[in-house]
Image (tube, rainbow, N blue to C red):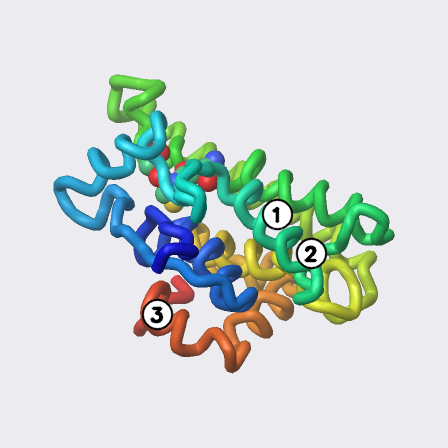
Amino acid sequence: MADAYRVYGGPGSGSVAVEAAMTLLGLPYTTVDAASWCGPDAKALAGQVNPLGQVPTVELPDGRLMTESAAILMMLGDLKPEAGLAPGPTDPARPDYLRWMVYVPANIYSMFLLRDDPSVWFDDPDDQDHLRERALERIKSCWRVMEAWSLGVKTPWLLGERMSLLDLYVTVVSRWSPRRRWFYDACPRLGEIVRRIDALPELQTFWAERFPFEEGWEG
Ligand SMILES: N[C@@H](CCC(=O)N[C@@H](CS)C(=O)NCC(=O)O)C(=O)O
């Protein structure tokens, strides 16, 4: 597919948010399994396209590379304004969109490297366990902050009457630790929104392939 995006990622990874957005926006893409859990060569594959060896990394149709999940999502949303999944520059919802699209990776997604590979910071296993626990506490407190903001939003979706890529992004990231049972309990308003995204008919085939609702998936 000459005009297709190539998404380096993996099932259950941050690439799922990008792939789901492309699915909703009708953008053609192919996937390359490059998340560390996809096999022995995956990390090296990710390293060929991203100096940090991280996914998602996207090769654009013109061959340029793009990293950073939120930046990729915002670029895609702006490419297809007619889809209404991203408030445009003059939309009153734009400040909240930019704020929370950056908040999620800056404060929550970034904590997962501390949990997945604490040896980057500490050699001692006890220190590593401590870092893992503290990172999880930080993730929880950051979700609570977002929940408190969302309680003031009286519309069906986080940014108004229309679903946006922010709702989608939160849906994917909220499937990771501390996982959904905690999330529904601590963040009921966000929980209601992500469950609506989980249930979108147009994403059911996609979820089954890339982030299936398997036994015990909620934690
Ligand atoms: N800031 C990046 C973070 C990406 C990230 O941490 N991806 C994880 C997989 S979900 C990863 O590749 N981890 C392996 C590593 O960091 O070495 C983004 O928002 O896209």
Q: Cβ(mark 2) to ligand 1 < 8 Å?
A: no
Q: Which residue is identified by label 3?
A: 212
Question: Residue 15 appears at what percent x and percent y?
Answer: 41, 51
Residue type at mark 2? Ala
Q: Residue at x 64, y 59 (%)?
A: 80
In the picture, residue 212 is in which quadrant? bottom left
Is 36 or 1 nearer to us in this picture?
Answer: 1
Q: Which image quarter is the N terminus in?
A: bottom left
Q: Which image quarter is the C terminus in?
A: bottom left
Q: Residue at x 39, y 77 (%)?
A: 205
Q: Ligand 1 quadrant?
A: top left
Number of the front mark, 1 or 3: 1
Residue 86's tag is 2
Q: Is residue 33 visible?
A: yes
Question: Residue 57 appears at what percent x and percent y?
Answer: 40, 41
Residue type at mark 3? Pro
Q: Are marks 1 and 2 in contact (CB under 8 Å)?
A: yes
Q: Residue at x 54, y 77 (%)?
A: 200
Q: Which residue is identified by label 1?
A: 74
- Describe residue 128's horizontal placement relative to residue 135 as left or right: left
Q: Is residue 187 visible?
A: no
Q: Cβ(mark 3) to ligand 1 < 8 Å?
A: no
Callout 2 secondary element = loop
**Residue at far front of view:** 2
Q: Residue at x 47, y 74 (%)?
A: 203
